[in-house]
Image (cartoon, rainbow, N blue to C red):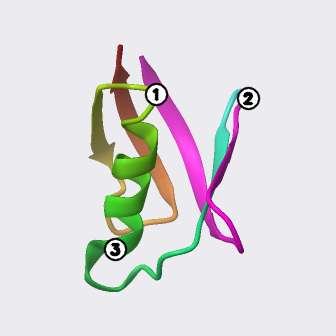
Amino acid sequence: MIVNCIVKKGSAFRVEKGAVWTICVTEPAENNRANRQIIKELSREYPSVRILRGASSRKKTLELLP
């Protein structure tokens, strides 16, 4: 499944699913920490998570495989 999402800073990690997902992360964007948190947290539900586009942007395209 391909998902477009917007990443925001939050007090807790959470995902709001819709046409465009909103992902709130607690880690800063420095040194790829926010991206690693997204992959780690989503891997609990989806075994394969990849960032296809937007690795250095708030707008990302993710590939999630069951």
Left or right: 10 as drawn, with respect to 38: right
Q: Are marks 1 and 3 in contact (CB under 8 Å)?
A: no
Q: Which residue is mark 2?
A: 18
Q: In which quarter of the view is residue 35 placed?
A: bottom left
Residue where numbered disc 1 is placed:
45
- Which one is closest to the eye, mark 1 or mark 3? 1
Q: Is residue 37 above or below residue 43?
A: below
Instruction: Kindly report the distance in space between the C-alpha atoms of the residues bearing marks 2 and 1.
Output: 16 Å
In the picture, the disc for residue 33 is 3
Q: Amino acid at mark 1?
A: Glu
Alpha carbons under labels 3 and 2: distance apart: 24 Å
Measured as percent of width and height from the top left, residue 47 is found at: 30, 26
Residue 34 appears in which quarter of the rendering?
bottom left
Residue 48: name its quadrant. top left
Q: Nearer the viewer, residue 37 or 51?
A: 37
Percent across and percent down for residue 1 are 42, 17
Is 9 covered by the magenta stretch? yes
Q: Nearer the viewer, mark 2 or mark 1?
A: 1
Please report whichever mark, 1 or 3, sits nearer to the chain's N-terminal start.
Answer: 3
Which amino acid type is marked by label 3? Arg
Q: Secondary structure at mark 3?
A: helix
Q: As displayed, is residue 18 above or below residue 16?
A: above
Q: Secondary structure at mark 2?
A: loop
Local crowd size for mark 1, using a 10 Å CA cut-off: few (<14), some (14–19), many (≥20): few
Mark 2 Cα shell of 10 Å, populated few (<14), some (14-19), many (≥20) = few
Q: Which residues are magenta?
A: 1-17
User: Residue, x 26% and y 82% (percent of image)?
Assistant: 31
Q: Describe the element under mark 1 as helix, strand or loop.
A: loop
Magenta-drawn stretch, dominant element (helix, strand or loop): strand
Q: Quadrant of the C terminus?
A: top left
